[in-house]
Image (cartoon, rainbow, N blue to C red):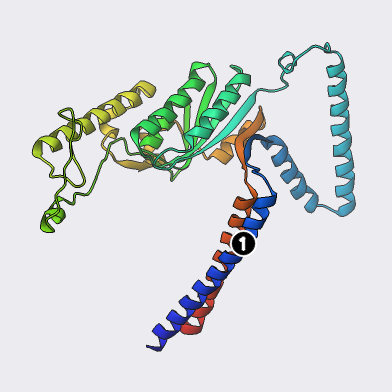
Amino acid sequence: MEFLYQSGLFATKAIIVVALIGAFVAFVISLLMRQAGPQTGEHLEVTKINERLAREKETLQYSAVDEQVAMAQHKHQRAQEKAERKAQKKALKKQPVSASLDDFPKDKPRVYVLDFDGDLQASAVGQMRRILSAVLEVAGKEDEVVLRLDSGGGVVHSYGLAASQLERVKTRGVKLTICVDKVAASGGYMMACVADQLLCAPFAVVGSIGVVAQLPNFNRLLKKHDIDFELLTAGQHKRTLTVFGENTDEGRKKFREDLDDIHTLFKEYVVGQRPSLDIEQVATGEIWLGRRALDLKLVDAIKTSDEYLQDACARATVLEVKFVARKSLQERIMSSFEMSADRVLTRLWHRATQQRFM
């Protein structure tokens, strides 16, 4: 009883604290929003991975040597960079004034790196299609697109659209490499199989070439409480199975036929992208870890995205491309409040449990 009392007292205090903080934050936001207009927007952000790795390498090298040696190395490095910039400026001066960026030769091929973090609705496809449209405006046949994919699948039409977006890269003649570090299953594998080169980590989850659909039915519960439910349709198979209506064997049969048809299309799509696959062996809805997936030819090689991109930096200019949303003042304040509240509640919970169980 004492424990329940202390737990209830703790929960009450936490709720009061959070409510007071929330009320104060809401009051501050309302005042600030009156003075500030909307500040939302998005911009394309590009990070040169070569330079980032070089800076990190340089930091580690300098930390491992004597301070004077590090200063000398740093000075020598900066002198080399200055000479390279000077040479680039001379080359630019030789170009006509009216020249566009397309007229300047590339020093190296380019590798454009994208991320896709999939949910059930494949909501990341919106940003991916915009990034691909931008990349394909500048990418040449000597360049490459690398997608770091992480998805357990979701609705058919959304992942079908995502896979179609990736096909645009191959249609343009640009190499497409997809790296799977964690999972590419079901709709995620539908996207992954489009790749010219499909890589995965040793314990990444791959496969699940199948279709699943489920829904509850409350018809018996409604009948028990004398509640009528009417569903009017025009078309024999407009609605096969319902949540509240009484489902029939005919409706179940039609629903099963639809699932089988989607599965057939899924298998045909995978075979079209990876003809060497034994589709009947892998299209059972099962999943495999990376090394087993390699044996079944679901992937082409075992390698993490970090390893692949680090190797790519030696032969190409590697550019990480993403859209960054500029949050409004209200969103920034609420995000900060949520993080602070989470830390406070976590700390209070730890203190309460430590007092109880230490």
| Three-letter code for the amino acid on which mark 1 is drawn | Phe
Q: Residue furthest bottom?
A: 2
* Extreme residue in the front direction: 34
Which quadrant is the N terminus positioned in? bottom left
Q: Secondary structure at mark 1?
A: helix
Residue bearing mark 1: 27
**Location of residue 71 in the rendering, given as x and y in whole percent from the top left corner:** 88, 48
| Residue under the point 55% across and 31% down | 146
Image coordinates of residue 174 in percent, x first then y, are 55, 20
The answer to whether 273 is drawn above or below residue 323 in the figure is: above
Residue furthest to the left: 249
Between 193 and 240, the one lying in front of the other is 240
- What crowding class fits label 1: few (fewer than 14 Cα within 10 Å), some (14-19), or many (20 or more)? few
Q: Residue at x 61, y 33 (%)?
A: 321
In-image side of 38 versus 281 (left or right): right
Q: Is residue 105 above or below residue 157?
A: above
Image coordinates of residue 240 in percent, x first then y, are: 18, 36
What is the quadrant of residue 259 in the picture? top left
